[in-house]
């Protein structure tokens, strides 16, 4: 794994789960809720409701994996990379980050894929007077270590627009 100099170190993931979870949540809050983050000049928002264990929905979606919301399980690899989310959004124009859009129903998602290893998904929300979105919603983030995941992402990234 070859990380760019702007990507933060992985967060430690050892010790008491409650303490680890609190540290990861604190980093998430510091990076994405306490100070504004912008993508393409628009603010990025994080969904807070419904909370789980006193922590917002968007946080859980970024650190856990599972097909059904009620069955999602924390993923250590996602947890370690919580500090990458803001860095990838702010550095989306760097060559290490691939960026494309995917239409899902009436929604437009922006996929930011760092080093074919970690994806951040932002959804356009609202309509601004200039025709662009009012803001972006952080939907999720996840690792893409498996070759079949990478093939699927490359196919979407490389599809004619």
Image (cartoon, grey):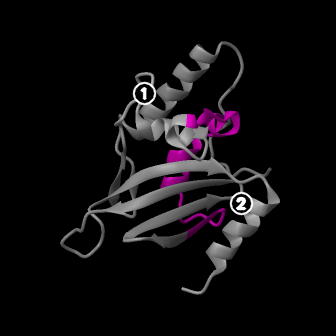
**Residue 30 occupies quadrant:** top left
Q: Judge whether 142 appears above or below 17 on screen.
A: below
Q: Judge from the rendering whether residue 112 lies leftward or rightward of residue 12; answer left or right.
A: left
Residue 69 locus on image (x, y percent):
51, 41
| Quadrant of the frame with the C terminus | bottom right
Q: Judge from the rendering whether residue 144 lies leftward or rightward of residue 21; answer left or right.
A: right
Query: Which of marks 1 and 2 precedes in the sequence?
Result: 1
Camera-nearest residue between 51 and 157: 51
Q: Is residue 44 magenta?
A: no
Secondary element under disc 1, as helix, strand or loop, is loop
Residue at image point 72% right, 50% down = 3
Residue 150 locus on image (x, y percent):
74, 63
Q: Judge whether 87 appears above or below 135 on screen.
A: above
Residue of label 2: 116
Dot in front, 2 or 1: 1
Residue of label 1: 55
Secondary element under disc 2, as helix, strand or loop, is loop
Residue 106 locus on image (x, y percent):
36, 71
Q: Which residues are magenta?
A: 71-99
Q: Residue furthest bottom?
A: 160
């Amino acid at each position: 794994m070859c990380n760019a100099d702007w990507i933060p170190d992985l967060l430690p993931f050892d010790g008491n789960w409650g303490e680890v979870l609190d540290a990861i949540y604190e980093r998430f809050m510091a990076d994405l809720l306490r100070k504004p983050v912008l993508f393409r000049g628009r603010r990025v928002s994080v969904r807070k409701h419904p909370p789980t264990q006193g922590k917002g929905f968007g946080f859980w979606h970024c650190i856990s994996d599972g097909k059904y919301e009620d069955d999602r399980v924390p993923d250590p690899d996602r947890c370690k990379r919580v500090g990458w989310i803001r860095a990838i959004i702010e550095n989306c124009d760097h060559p290490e980050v691939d960026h494309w859009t995917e239409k899902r129903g009436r929604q437009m998602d922006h996929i930011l894929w760092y080093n074919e290893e970690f994806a951040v998904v932002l959804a356009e929300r609202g309509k601004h007077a200039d025709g662009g979105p009012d803001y972006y919603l952080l939907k999720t983030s996840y690792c893409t270590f498996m070759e079949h995941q990478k093939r699927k992402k490359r196919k979407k990234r490389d599809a004619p627009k």
